[in-house]
């Protein structure tokens, strides 16, 4: 009789908390929005036996089993991408425009440019849709009076861009962006070079890290930055959200779908979230907000979270809280490393542009969350994408 674990309903990853390749694979699935089950073989003797049997006696992890019965052992990200059918290499080598980032900004710019007949390549290292794609519901995007799920919004926007002929690469990182005479040269993580007449940096921003002891050891284990990606692993557990802004309150509310208790801790004396979100949280019997407290350390034991060490900023008293998982939402840092030392950025690293959204590098534009002065809203991100496309079109005509 065939082992039912060889044909799971969704992708199943067998690994451990101390295995770096397991963490990488989990991160890959999270970034690409691939639903998966995680089984810790250190805590499950039957799972360990299954891994040994599958690998002819070897305890090779991660062992990843797919619904079609395929098994990948210690796969690279490229192998995972191939298995998932993601396009990681472009059909051409030169384009009118290359767009770095597949969020609302990049996809909107792509559809506007492609609709005008431009040859457009979009390169996205993570899941399409950016932060909008992992938002449970977009309820303030114009035209969707009853809201729309972030995943559905992303799927529609992606199909729209592709309908007009935009080419989209996924699970592919841009390693370098260089000005080469009149052209822009983009090099991807696999060493492939692509040329373009113009480029748009629409790489968005990422959630900031805490920068405290224990955080690095627990990222992907008990520390997370995406409630939609990782919340389901904490059914019936206690979770702590760090950050009292809109993101922290929104994600905290979402986590109540799984967790038995959700706490929110805010550094300041008052929450920064909108009053509507504060009221929603206050209505939840299993949510609690603690203000004016700073998280100082995540204590680790046996590669797992043992305790959260916090300090009452009013009294200086330190406390230890017990939680099963941590979700961090304390602001954004721009994904602007490609511009470092090459283009003007502000004190926080956001790209500085002129009124046409062009950076200080001729032919290289920036829009959306990565740009200094942007409003960090999905609707304005899409609007900037449209504006950038029109400005790039004018630039291409001049060239």
Image (spheres, rainbow, N blue to C red):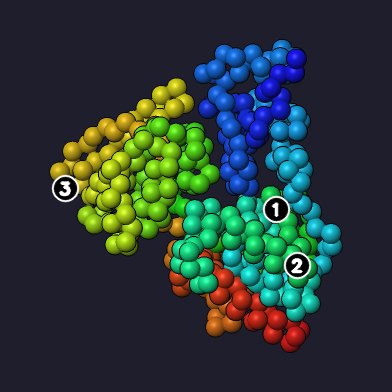
The location of residue 197, given as percent across then percent down, is: 76, 74
- The residue located at (71%, 14%) in the rendering is 53
* Observer-nearest of 197 and 256: 256
Could you tell me which quadrant the C terminus lies in? bottom right
**Residue 211 appears left or right of 196:** left
- Spatial CA span between label 2 and label 3: 57 Å
Q: Which residue in the protein does label 2 denote?
A: 163
- The outermost residue toward the left is 315
- The residue located at (53%, 27%) in the rendering is 17
Q: Which residue in the protein does label 1 denote?
A: 170
The answer to which quarter of the image holds residue 317 is: top left
- The outermost residue toward the right is 92
- Indicate which disc, 2 or 3, sits on the residue closer to the N terminus: 2
The location of residue 331, given as percent across then percent down, is: 41, 56
- Answer above or below: position of 372 versus 4: below
- The residue located at (49%, 35%) in the rendering is 233
- Indicate which disc, 1 or 3, sits on the residue closer to the N terminus: 1
- The outermost residue toward the front is 146
* Observer-nearest of 250 and 215: 250
**Residue 281 appears left or right of 391:** left
**Residue 275 appears left or right of 348:** left
Q: Which residue in the protein does label 3 denote?
A: 314
């Amino acid at each position: 009789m065939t082992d039912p674990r060889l044909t799971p309903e969704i992708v199943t990853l067998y690994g451990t908390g101390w295995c770096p390749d397991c963490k990488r694979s989990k991160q890959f699935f999270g970034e690409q929005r691939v639903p998966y089950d995680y089984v810790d073989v250190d805590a499950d003797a039957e799972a360990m036996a299954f891994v040994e049997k599958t690998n002819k006696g070897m305890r090779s992890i991660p062992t990843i089993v797919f619904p079609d019965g395929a098994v990948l052992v210690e796969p690279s990200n490229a192998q995972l991408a191939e298995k998932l059918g993601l396009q990681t290499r472009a059909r051409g080598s030169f384009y009118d425009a290359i767009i770095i980032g597949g969020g609302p900004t990049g996809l909107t710019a792509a559809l506007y440019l492609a609709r005008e007949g431009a040859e457009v390549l979009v390169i996205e290292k993570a899941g399409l849709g950016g932060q909008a794609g992992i938002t449970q519901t977009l309820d303030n995007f114009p035209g969707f009076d009853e809201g729309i799920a972030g995943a559905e919004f992303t799927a529609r926007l992606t199909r729209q861009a592709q309908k007009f002929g935009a080419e989209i690469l996924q699970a592919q990182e841009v390693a370098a962006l260089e000005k080469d005479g009149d052209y822009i040269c983009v090099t991807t993580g696999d060493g492939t070079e692509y040329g373009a007449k113009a480029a748009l940096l629409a790489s968005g921003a990422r959630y900031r890290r805490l920068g405290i002891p224990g955080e690095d050891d627990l990222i992907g284990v008990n520390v997370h930055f995406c409630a939609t990606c990782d919340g389901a692993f904490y059914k019936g557990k206690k979770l702590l959200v760090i950050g009292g802004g809109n993101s922290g309150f929104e994600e905290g509310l979402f986590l109540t779908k799984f967790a038995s208790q959700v706490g929110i801790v805010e550094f300041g004396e008052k929450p920064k979230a909108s009053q509507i979100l504060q009221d929603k949280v206050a209505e939840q019997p299993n949510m609690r907000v603690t203000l004016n407290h700073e998280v100082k350390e995540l204590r680790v034991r046996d590669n797992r979270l043992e305790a959260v060490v916090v300090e009452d900023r009013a009294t200086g008293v330190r406390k230890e809280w017990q939680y099963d998982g941590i979700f961090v939402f304390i602001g954004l840092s721009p994904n602007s490393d490609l511009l470092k030392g090459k283009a003007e950025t502000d004190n926080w690293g956001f790209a500085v542009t002129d009124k046409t959204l062009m950076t200080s590098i001729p032919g290289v534009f920036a829009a959306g969350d990565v740009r200094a002065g942007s409003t960090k809203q999905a609707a304005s991100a899409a609007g900037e994408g449209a504006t950038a496309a029109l400005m790039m079109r004018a630039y291409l005509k001049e060239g």
